[in-house]
Amino acid sequence: MDTTVRKLEMLDTFNYRHATKEFDPEKKIPEDDFQFILEAGRLSPSSGGNEPWRFVVVQSPEFRNELAPHVSGAVRQLPTSSHFVLILARKGLTYDSPYLVEQQTQKMQMPLEVFNKMRPAYEQFYHDLHLDSERALVDWSSKSTYIALGNMMTAAAHIGVDSCPIEGFELDAVNDLLQKRGLLGDDEYSLSVMVAFGHRVREARPKKRLPMNEIVKFV
């Protein structure tokens, strides 16, 4: 395909996407379309390829009702969306954590002796980024989850599915609900961000963005 056509298609996708505040509850996303959206999240890049995320798809009306009092940012999206996703960030992902070692040596198939030689470089990387507290480590994992979030919303828009990222929630209260349902593992994860998917009930207003020359500088 001509790259000009591909670029125009991609720009159409970005222009189509908007933060949908209310969805049509009668319009459900077909399963194969939603699997495509999840695949975009799964294939997203992360630091070191460590995939520090989990995706919890909340379809149960009961669980949505439990969430509702603690999610002020999704008053309309939570009850009307076709699919509602909680993106979790892995906690405690230090340079020598068992999970990271397993990811690098098993999933990424790096020989253990090579990984051991690289430990000082990993340690320096974490030191340079001040990843020296539980909060800093969760924030670092959360940065990767936002890459997955963006890719999922773009993938959705590409096939005509709407979405809305959600940050307005009571973190501790939602984590408590997730923990009670056994969705945080052995205290391995924390909620990072939420995202709703479905079909808009009204057309979006034209996008308004700052002009390119105000946000880009070549040096």
Image (cartoon, grey):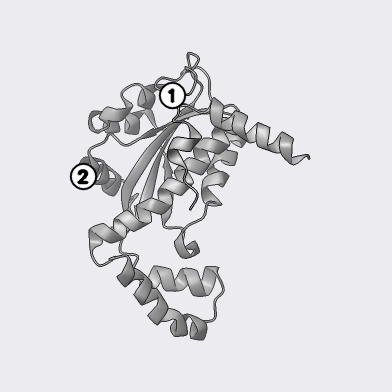
Measuring 48% from the left and 53% from the top, which residue is drawn there? 219
Q: Residue furthest right?
A: 1
Give the residue at mark 1.
20
Q: From mark 1 to mark 2, how far is it between C-alphas?
A: 26 Å
Q: Which mark is drawn over residue 176?
A: none
106 up-or-down from 156: above or below: below
Query: If the image is split into quadrants, where does the N terminus sit?
Result: top right
| Figure label count | 2
Instruction: Tell me the residue at 26%/41% (across/down).
Output: 174
Which of discs 1 and 2 lies nearer the camera? The answer is: 1
Q: Amino acid at mark 1?
A: Thr
* Point 43% across, 24% down: residue: 20
Instruction: Please state the horizontal and vertical placement of residue 93, each as a whole percent of the image.
Output: 35, 65
Q: Nearer the viewer, residue 48 or 78?
A: 48
Q: Mark 2 belongs to which amino acid?
A: Asp
> Where does label 2 land, which residue?
172
Q: Tag 1, which secondary structure?
A: loop
Answer yes or no: is residue 93 visible: yes
Residue 204's place in the image compared with 151, above or below, is: above
Provide residue 189's location: percent of width, then percent of height. Answer: 33, 54
Q: Residues within 10 Å of mark 2 (few under 14, many from 20)?
A: few
18 or 141, nearer to the observer: 18
Q: Residue at x 55, y 26 (%)?
A: 16
Vertical placement of residue 6 versus 116, above or below: above
Residue closest to the eye, 170 or 121: 121
171 vs 114, left or right, is left
